Image (tube, rainbow, N blue to C red):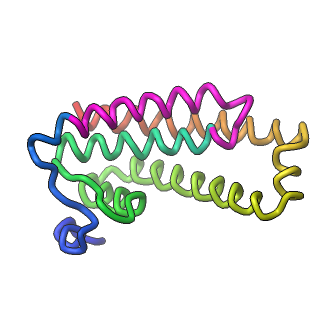
Amino acid sequence: MVSIETLILEEKVSSIRELEVERYVNFFENSTKDNLEHCKATIKAFPRWSIISGYYAMHDITKLMIAKKFRLKMEREVHATTIKILRELIKDKEVTRLIEKGYKEFISMANDLADAREERTKAQYYTGTAFMRERFQKISEEFLLETVIPYLERIRKLME
């Protein structure tokens, strides 16, 4: 496991100055809420974007918790660094498992989107058929209910 000190030396993490804390907290509280609402609102119409928004709700609440409790902010390799900090600070294996699952889901969807840009046929296959739309709706709904919401609830408890 990578230590926080190492991440600071690598300039991947830094301390939040006292005057910045409120701004960080407000931003991530609102961002988490917005991403969760977007996740819920796009399940049927844009299920792949729903998964991405769900992941970002998880990612942002994690950065919120780290900022509030530990006064740290991510500077580089933000997604991977956030997971490393979480592993170091929180020994709750279930929380770590959920954020990693969210990150993998996000990467999978982001890769699909990047591939789709280059491969029109693949993009049409994923977004153009009723079968694939239903499949992604189901995946998106399960991701929200089984990963995003439980994760957000656990992190909120840690922030109490």
> Image quarter for residue 45?
top right
> Image quarter for residue 128?
top right
Q: Left or right? Give the position of 32 relative to 74.
A: right
| Above or below, comparing residue 64 to residue 74 in the picture | above
Q: Left or right? Give the position of 90 relative to 59.
A: left
| Residue 3 placement (x, y as % from top left) | 22, 69
| Residue 20 placement (x, y as % from top left) | 16, 42
| Residue 114 placement (x, y as % from top left) | 68, 60
Query: Image point 18% across, 43% down: which residue?
Result: 69
The magenta-colored residue range is 23-49
Query: Image point 19% across, 59% down: which residue?
Result: 14
> Image quarter for residue 153?
top left
If the image is split into quadrants, where does the C terminus sit?
top left
Whether the magenta-drawn stretch holds residue 35 is answered as yes
Query: Image point 70% across, 55% down: which residue?
Result: 113
| Residue 123 placement (x, y as % from top left) | 82, 53
Q: Nearer the viewer, residue 149 or 92?
A: 149
Q: Left or right? Give the position of 144 relative to 157.
A: right
- Residue projecting furthest to the left: 18
| Above or below, comparing residue 15 to residue 57 in the picture | below
Query: Image point 29% across, 60% down: which residue?
Result: 75
Number of numbered discs present? 0
